[in-house]
Image (cartoon, grey):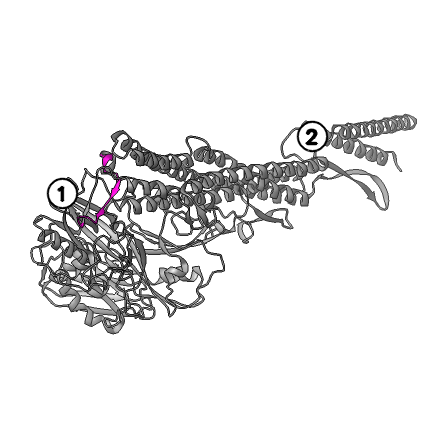
Amino acid sequence: MSLTAGLSTALSGLQTSQRGLDVVAQNVSNLNTTGYSRKVMNQESVVLNGAGSGVRVGNITRVVNEGLLKDIRRQSGSVAKLQVQQNYFPRIDQLFGEVGSGNSIAHKVSELAQAFTTLSGDASSAATQWSTMQSGQDVADNLNFMTDQLQGLRAQADQDIASSVEDINSALKRIHELNLQIVKHSAISTGTSELEDQRDQALTELSENMDIQYYTRFDGSVTVFAGTGGQLLLDDSPQYLHFTPSSIVNSSMTAAGGQFGKISVDSGTADLTPMIGNGKLKALIDLRDKSIPDMQANLDQLTAQLKDTINQVHNRGTSLPNVASKYEGSRTFAWQAGQPAARQQTMRLSSPDQDVMLLTFDPSGNQTGKISLREVMQTAFTATPSLPGDAPRDAADFTAQGANEAWTINEVSAHIEGWLRSQGNTSARVNLDAQGKMVMDTGSPSVALTFRDQGSLVGAIPPVNGTVSGAPSKDATIIFNTSGMIGSDGNPVADQTVQGFSNFFGLNDFFVNGVPNSNYDSDVLPSGFTTASASWMKVYDQSGQIGTTLKIPQGASLDTIAKIINNQTHTNESDSLTAGATWTTTTPTNFVIRQTNGATTTAVVPPGTYTLDDMVTAIQPQLTAAGITVEKVTEGPYERLRFTQGVRNTATPESPLEGGGKALEVVASGGAVGGSPLDFGQTLNMAPQQHVQAAVVPEGSGYRLRIRQTDGTELFLSARPDAQGKTLLSELGLQPAATNSAAHVKVRDDIKAAPEKISRGEVQWNPDVGRYYLSVGDNSNVLDLATAMNAKRPFETSGGLHSAQYTLSEFSAATVALSAQEGGRSKTQLEYEENLCKSLTFQQASLSGVNLDEEVAKMMDFQQAYSAAARVISVLQEMLETLTNMVR
């Protein structure tokens, strides 16, 4: 080896040792840097022409275990998810309180039960009456407040989802930028280990927000996918997430129903939400869509049961000496006017041995008038005009009806009004008001109207025109048909069953809700549920039927039922127009209807004077062949023109046209109206409508089918029974939902203003004089209220509670306990997951972390190697100088 070759070899050793010392210094200085991985300098021998020529610095590599890193990221996501839960659950626990605490809902319900018991012992005490009313309002206020707070937490979770999405996008952007730098430096061999550390840290931050899958490409860049669904988030460019939080959140809103924004990516509109299985984002989604709604469902179930239980008993009672001459019902009915007889809502008593006594009393509790419901319905009365704002009635509503048949709501109101007026109460008013609720007014504050449901007197045969006076008091079973649909037995179908005549109308409720029943919920059903047989169902709102009759096939899942409802309840409607208005057109009005299959049909209405009824008569014959129905629908004092895909058979209204109810495009134009700036087409302003929406909503361990009226108005469902008498409503347990109950429940306003109106006694029978009477000291009703509060009753599955027999206090206590249990379970799991994460992190630190002892040892090795190489250079330099001197 020549001296210059030796110098070169020694110099390479010197430079390599110096680089090694640099790496050691870098490791030591980053001892406490988060995300830093220990670096190792790899040395390579230099060989020229088969002979060793020194050493050179190879790649500076990171000491990491990719498999362990992926485990840590998965575990970090789990810890982050549970940490988010622990930010929310303690606040929920504080809201629900403890079972034994004085501020919990369980305590408030128990206080109300005790208040009714106290009132039964001192029914005439004004102070006790006020205290009882206040206990009821305290329960309502607590339920209102808890609902408001729970929905506030859902709103916060929705906002936090938006923040998490921003963090995800920020991490994706950093990873993409680091990818570009790593690819660049890899190409020019300038080292990428520090950049890879930064990228690893960004990947870890990303995994804390959501679960990801990723792999490293040949050029050193990483490709990232979301969750387990395979949605690409980062390849050559990032696919950023998009999410818009909701500005309003209430208990009826669900992600499944489309009331919350979806998480989408740049490359498409698909909802990413179901693909997210871990991390902060998963926790927030679950809180907004599952955990908090489950707790809310328990509150709503408690509220509905409390309201129904108290109201059923309270409606039986009276409050002498505060006689009630006027009642305003809480149940909302569909608009009866303008509906054909076959589609009007009806009610009937379930069996011939049931009846209802209609009674009037003077202020002292003495009977002044009496008739049974069956008897009054068989009596003909003279038609009286409706007052402004009341639902119109026909003269036929006042004619004599059968004793054991179904009566329309208008017929019932007409006959009771006719009877009251026949008793000399010429100002009596019994009718549906502008909101569709029953109003019964004797017209005189000195004339009290009361109701007493009765069964058969033992051993007696009821007369043809009513029940026997003095028969035992017993709630009548009211069968409510919401649509006029007729069953195979020739009777109107039983869509709902309600106990108690006054309770059916909600005439004397203690608790009221104040919002329409715009939602129907099924029972909580398993994910694999399918229908046992084919069924027919109608969907109504106050204005009439939405879409055509729906055919639900045998074996249909909840998702299938929801799709059928959503696909077949489209309409196209005009603006609301004044009922009975007429228009005189001087040019033809054209209606162009485009169906979903692309077919176009045109109807032309010649110039003339028209009401909406006249317009329907002119249009319908031109559209029947195309399978399109046009009709006028009534909304109180307003009317609309409605177009629907599918023709209703007037002979058998239950028979639908296949494919009925699908979306239509309707363009109305022309029809110049004299003296108006708008023609008739512009006046109508036709637009597509989706009044009804169905969704499958997760709750507890199963799912509910939820059907809602999108405008927030009253909703009605009706289904034809099969040969066994079962309907789709009974099979699914579809009934007006408890949803929103806790948010709006309150004690009736006039009872809050005058607690003496709390029902305390009931109509009694005096066999000695053969008359009914009311008594100031009667406490029978309030005793029944106290008993009902403490009686066990069936509760359906809701939230995380399974169906069982509970008292109201027991169910409220179970609701509180479940909240505490959920929070405790999450806390315990967080402790376990954190310990596991620490264990994995320790393993990673043992492998990738900087060990000072090791680094000192390496430093000494490099220092000695450096000194040795320097000594070699010094010796070679001396030799070279000696050789030079010799030459001289």
Q: Position of residue 176 (x, y in %)?
A: 55, 44
Above-or-below relation of 182 to 338: above
Callout 1, which amino acid? Asp
- Which circle's residue, 2 or 1, is located before the other in the chain? 2
Residue topped by disc 1? 362
Badge 2 local density, few (<14 within 10 Å), some, or many (20+)? some
Q: Residue 125, labelled with which disc? A: none
**Cα–Cα gap, marks 2 and 1:** 99 Å
Quarter that holds the N terminus: top right
Looking at the rendered structure, the secondary structure element under dot 2 is: helix
Q: Position of residue 587 (x, y in %)?
A: 11, 64
From the viewer's side, name the closer residue of 609 and 510.
510
The residue lying furthest to the right in this view is 886
Q: Position of residue 608 (x, y in %)?
A: 9, 65
Q: Is residue 637 visible?
A: no
What residue is at 37 percent from the left and 35 percent from the top?
Answer: 114
What residue is at 32 percent from the left and 40 percent from the top?
Answer: 783
Highlighted range, magenta = 754-770
Residue topped by disc 2? 26
